[in-house]
Amino acid sequence: MYQRNIKKKLISIAKQFPVVALLGPRQSGKTTLVKSLFPEYAYTNLENINQKDLALTDPLYFLKSYQKNGGLIIDEAQNAPELFSQIQLSVDENRGHYILTGSQNFLMSEKISQTLAGRVAIFDLLPLSINELKEADLLSKDLNSALFRGGYPRIFEKGLAPEDWYPNYIRTYLEKDVRQMKNVHDLSTFQRFLKFCAGRVGQVINFSDLGRDCGISYQTAKGWLSLLEASFILFMQPPFYKNYSKRVVKSKKLYFYDTGLLCSLLQIESVNDLAHHYLRGNIFESYIVSELIKLRLNAGKRPNCYFWRDQKGNEVDCILERGDQLIPIEIKSSETITKDYFKSLRHFCELSQTPPENSYLIYGGDENQIRREANVLSWSSLEELSN
C-alpha cells in the first residue's frame, strides 16, 4: 500500500458529502486506496457479472442489502449507471454513504451530473506521482528510468518489466473499454490513432491533420480524442491567451498522463532506447506537465496549467494561474543549463509584468538553484510548486 497524497482530502470530504466519486484510469490504485481509507464500508465490484445484474434489475434491493454496514464502496460504478438514481433517493433519505469508483469518466460524469449534483464530491486519482514515489523510496535517481517506468502502482508492487506490462495494459484498455464506446467501430484504426497521438506528444494539435494522417474525419478525430481524455489516457493543455498580444496560438497541446504508457505506444522498449529517442524532450515535457496536474488533483483542486505561444515563436511551456498571480515555467530535459533556456521566460515576464522570482526552469538535472532570471528546479523537486 503506497501512501497517496490525496487521502487526507478524501477523508475530510467524505465527512461532508454523502457520496464521493473517485475516478481515474484502470490500475491507478483507486480500489486499494478507498478500501484502506474506509475499512468499515461494505464493498462490491460491478465488474462481477452477478453484482452488475442485480444492480441493474433490482437497484433498490441491491442497495438495501448493504445498508446495515452504513457505507458502501461501489467499484467500477459506471457499469450500472441506472443505480445512481436509487443512490440519490437513498442519500436524500439519509440512508447511507457511498464511495463510487470508475475508470470511464465519460460514463460516470454524465450520470453523476444528471442525478447526484449537489450530493457528490468528485476526485481524480492518477498513477503514482514523483512525490509519492519519493516517499515510498521508489523513485529512480535516473531520469530515463523514471520516464520509462511511469507511475502505475502494479509496476512497482510486482516488480514488473514496463516493456511487458504496458502493451498488455493497452490491449486490455482497447478490448475492455473501447469496445463499449458507441462511436468506435474499428479497433485497429482506433489503436493506430492512439499511436499517432503518441507521436504528437507535446505538440499543438490540428484535428484535421491528425484525422487525415490516420484516415478518419476531423469530427472522428475530435471525438476520439475526447474519449481518450475521458479514459485518462491523455489530456489537452489549454492555451493562456490574455491579451498581451493578439497574435497568440489558441489551439491546445497534447500530453499523456503517464510516460511509461507513452513510451510503450512509441515502441520504446528499453531505457537505452528512450535515452536516444528523438521525442525524449517531448516525453519529459509531458512528464512534468502531468506531474503539475497531479499536484493539484491530489490536493483536491482542479488543474490550473496552461501554455503560451505567440505566432512569432515565443513560447512558455507551462503557466500556472493562481488568482492574480502567474507562475511561468520552462521545461528542458537537458542536465546542463544554458542562457537560452531563460529567453522565453524573460520575454513573458516583461510582457505580463511578472516578477522573475515567480518564474521557474525545470530541467533534467539534480541541483536546485536561485538565479536572477528564474528559479531552477530539478525534475525530482516539483513539490516546491504544490502551493
Image (tube, rainbow, N blue to C red):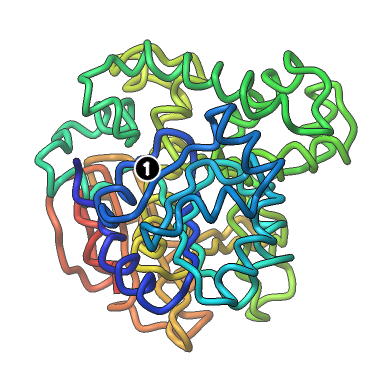
103 left or right of 270? right
Q: Nearer the viewer, residue 302 or 140?
A: 302
Q: Position of residue 282 (x, y in %)?
A: 47, 38
Task: Please indicate, yes or no, whether residue 49 appears anywhere in the rendered image.
Answer: yes
Q: What residue lies at 29% left-to-right and 74% top-to-bottom?
A: 387
Frontmost residue, 324 versus 96: 96
- In the rendered image, residue 176, in percent from the top left (x then y), is placed at 62, 23
How many other residues sit within 10 Å of disc 1, few (<14), some (14-19) or many (≥20)?
many
Residue 304 in view, yes or no:
no
Q: Residue at x 66, y 54 (%)?
A: 252
Q: Position of residue 300 (x, y in %)?
A: 40, 68
| Residue 346, horizontal then vertical, whole percent | 41, 71
Residue wearing tag 1: 31
- Residue at position x 47%, y 86% from top? 323
User: Which quadrant of the figure has residue 373?
Assistant: bottom left
Looking at the image, residue 353 lies above or below residue 218: below
Numbered label tally: 1
- Among all residues in the image, which is located at the extreme left? 137
Relative placement, left or right, of 315 versus 194 is left
Vertical placement of 373 versus 163: above or below?
Answer: below
